[in-house]
Image: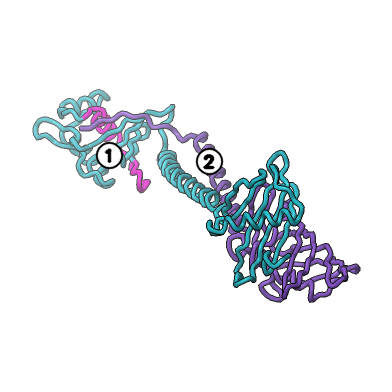
Amino acid sequence: MKMQFVVIPTISTELQMKAKILTAIVFLLMIISILFYCFFARYITIDLPFKCIYSTDYVFTYNQRIQKIHLTHDLRIYDAKSGYLLMNGYANSENQTYQIRRSILLNNIREKQDRTFQANIIKSISMENDTMPDALFNIILQEYQVGNDNLQLDIFHLHFQTWLIGGPYAFISVCQRY
Amino acid sequence: MHYTVNKSIIYNPADGSLTHIESGDLITLPLPAQRLLQILLDSEGKLISREDLLSKVWEQYGLNGSGNNLNQYLSIIRRSFSSFGCEWFIETIPRVGVRLFESVMVIKGTDVSVPPSFREQKNFFLLRNECSLLSLVMIGAALLMFLIWCFIFFSHDKTNPSYITQSLEGGCQLVTFLHLPTKDLASVKRHVNDYMKMSGEKCEPGVAIYFDNISSQNIGKHVRTLISVCDRNNEDEDAVCSNTYYINGVADES
């Protein structure tokens, strides 16, 4: 006959307490991980708000004519619902200088693919001192557009606070995040 | 003190009760049966003579026990164990005595003072099961978290365009993206040198020049080119960048 002599312990409230604490910690970590994953799944890789400034000279060459537009930009994406692109600067065309003061208001900002964002253009606001003809300004805006009301931006990280801003056609500028 | 038989039945000598662990059913044995069972459980499987049992169960208590009495209480014990699924418990050796079957496993348990009731026992086993389940859940959760964090870690930077940096004559850094064909590097350097001369910039240490001329609309001379000149600070960060974005080609500008 097999005889075994063991001591059966009584129920340990300490064990119960430890089990409850461990369970709570594990579930808390799980919830944090899932929330973190959901956050990244929604915004994927860029933590918002994303604010970036850059200064760009747009040089258009068409039929041997060169058109230069000097602009500073302030791109802000606050969240999926709101953002804007400010454009301030000037353009020289046919011995005239035009002032540019425009705000492109955005909403419904969504990540179409890895770090390629599309947004709806709610409206393009011209400030009072903006003298730029729309036809000329649209040449620039079209570099960012995939449709009349849709703007597309590639936002890639390069180096420390340096980010690359691309449009549907090409990389347009290097910007400094702030 | 209590006994666990075949890990399924608990005998508590304090109240003479047999408890079936799985179902929670309980049988209280009559006093002679309790004494008999106690002797059997303490016997460690050794053979016990009938005379010895009669003496210890009845005579020591000033009672007269007969062979029939002994058979009757052995039968009660057998039936009790049998009802809890233990068919082979007491083995009778004719004209000699009885002993526990070799297959019977007895675990002798001790407690602080009071033997655990069935409810406590049940809770203990439930707790052990819960702990095992908890361990599984925790391992699973840890694994899930590890996978999520791995996914985030490894996918974090994969979408950023890879670039190469090379020094140009003068000490500035030229940054081009990997999608730029290697064969084009020589012409890129020429473009950049021309641009630097035209714009009055100097190629010197602390200056980084980003260049890219790949466009989805590259057809003939309809190209788009980005040249960005950045001054880097002491921490090697791009402090100020000046971008020039050409449409329809650098070559056309003169």
Q: What is the x, y in percent for residue B115?
A: 40, 32
The answer to whether residue A136 is magenta is no
Q: Which residue type carries mark 2? A: Leu
Q: Under tag 1, what secondary structure?
A: loop
Q: Under tag 2, what secondary structure?
A: helix
Q: Is residue B73 above or below residue A128?
A: above
Rendered residue at 81%/66% (across/down): A103
Look at mark 2 in the image and give the residue it sits on: A22
**Between marks 1 and 2 in the image, the one whose residue lies nearer the viewer:** 2
Q: What is the x, y in percent for residue A70?
A: 80, 62
**What color does chain A have in the rendering?**
purple
Q: Is residue B191 above or below residue B90?
A: below
Q: Which residue type carries mark 1? A: Asn
**What color does chain B have in the rendering?**
cyan
Chain bearing tag 1 is: B
Look at mark 1 in the image and give the residue it sits on: B6
Q: Quadrant of the N terminus of chain B?
A: top left
Rendered residue at 20%/25% (across/down): B55
Q: Bounds of the magenta span?
A: B19-44
Rendered residue at 65%/58% (across/down): B191
Q: Residues within 10 Å of mark 2 (few under 14, many from 20)?
A: some
Q: What is the x, y in percent for residue A131?
A: 88, 71
Position of residue A104 in the picture relative to residue B165 (left or right): right
